[in-house]
Image: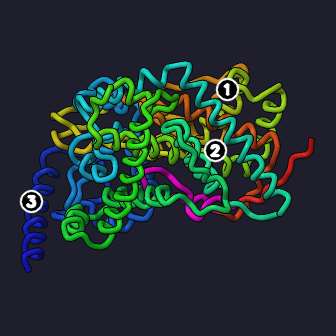
Amino acid sequence: MAVIIVLGLVVLICGVFLVKRRNSFEFYGPKSYPFVGCMISFWKNQSRLCEWYTELLRDSPTQTMTIQRLGAITTVMTANPENVEHILKTRFENYPKGHTFNEILHDLLGNGIFNADGEPWRMQRKIASYEFNTKSLRNFIVDCVQAETTDRLLPLLEQACQSGSVLDFQDVLRRFSFDNICKVAFGMDPNCLDLSLPQSEFAEAMDVASYLSSKRARSVISLEWKLKRALNVGSEKTLAEAVRVVHKFARDIIDKRSVEGDLKPDLLSRFLQLTQGNFEEDCLRDIVVSFVLAGRDTTASALTWFFWLVSSHPEVEELIFNEVNKLKALSYEEMKGMEYLHAAIYESMRLFPPVRYDSKQALHDDYLPDGTFVKKGSRVTYHPYAMGRMDSIWGTDCMEFKPERWIKDGVFLPQRPFKYAVFQAGARMCLGKDMALIQMKYIAASVIRGFRLRVDPQHEGHCIPSLTASMKNGLPVVVEKRSS
């Protein structure tokens, strides 16, 4: 009875607030009603939020909208590059991650670099920035990717080719990325790419925790998940159990590395050396979890959509093969000259970014460059997935997979990061960008040089809503050996 009374009061308070807000200024947004805002439309489109948001942003005169619904703070969402630059650079200090975002992901990510603000974020950023720019780390990353590709991935594809079996290539890529990030970040080898072995308990728990954490953000009423967490029931109980597995894995890694003491080339050892024990255990744990989320999930997601697109565009595959076939060896220096492959990877992430949207929270009242008012405390979201589908940004052929749009006079032509916000931009620009691109280019070049991956044309690329964009039902492929 008490819960019903509380919910009733919330409905009344939010309804009055929404009516007051609607009368305070004009805005573009989904169809709304008194008291509930756009909650009905939100509920109807819950299974396709990205597509729904994209449609609304495309129809907006400025590619920006304001969303108000019962049980959630006001959200300003944009696919306007000038607004993105304002949020991520010009007024960066006014748009931290904020309490709302931190609360949703805190159980999993704690105060790791993706979830932190202020001094905790600055300290992690400073150390990570220094390390990611060292030549020794780059060489270590290249060595790890080469070994995993040569010793495990290519023999696996050869075996699938000979047996004629169907591979879930998304699963293969996730296992590859997990092996690789564990080597690079922690100096350990879980050997997940051996398909005869079950998936890592930690990797499975990470999948569950990522999905259920993102589910909080999609709740029609946030009070729902908060009540479940307080009572430890349903999805929140499952999330808590998954997070315990994830955190135990992270603590075990930290304990092992701390006992060993000697300097190793992995990222965690570098962090421990530079901080000289100044980080608390929980902070190190959060750093470990953030490394895995960034190094495993995003790279595997980007490559899954890349191979799905390439499989249905044989002309693109042939151009990549011709470029790769000219190389004497797949070395770091040689790969830097692979302009068309670089363009194809960027083009696939334009259409299918690993992280489809990202949110901040306004510290003070503000106006975006297009005139949209942002009230203090509002959630502010920029939407790379929608931005890749805007005629106003990419032209009328924006829905086509055309690597050529990135090439001028045979050379890759980068775009402004606020137009192509796949790696974020400004002060929070992704530090692992170069590391991810090395891995993606090496895998793509190695696979396409030796094999063709055939995907059933009827296989639809639907996304599972999570922190990163995984493909629903995986990516089943038939592997064919490319003739010499």
Under circle 2, the secondary element is loop
Magenta region: which residues? 460-476
CA–CA distance between discs 2 and 1?
15 Å
For label 3, the residue is 16
x, y percent for residue 345: 63, 37
- Real-space Cα distance between discs 3 and 1? 53 Å
Q: Is residue 467 magenta?
A: yes
Q: Position of residue 320 (x, y in %)?
A: 76, 36
Q: Earlier in the sequence, mark 3 or mark 1?
A: 3
Instruction: Categorize mark 1 by other alpha carbons within 10 Å: few (<14), some (14-19), many (20+).
Output: some
The residue at which mark 2 appears reads as 400
Query: Quick one: label 3 or label 2, which is nearer the N terminus?
Result: 3
Instruction: Work out which quarter of the rendered image holds the N terminus and state it.
Output: bottom left
Q: Quadrant of residue 19?
A: bottom left
Q: Is residue 223 visible?
A: yes
- The amino acid marked with disc number 2 is Glu
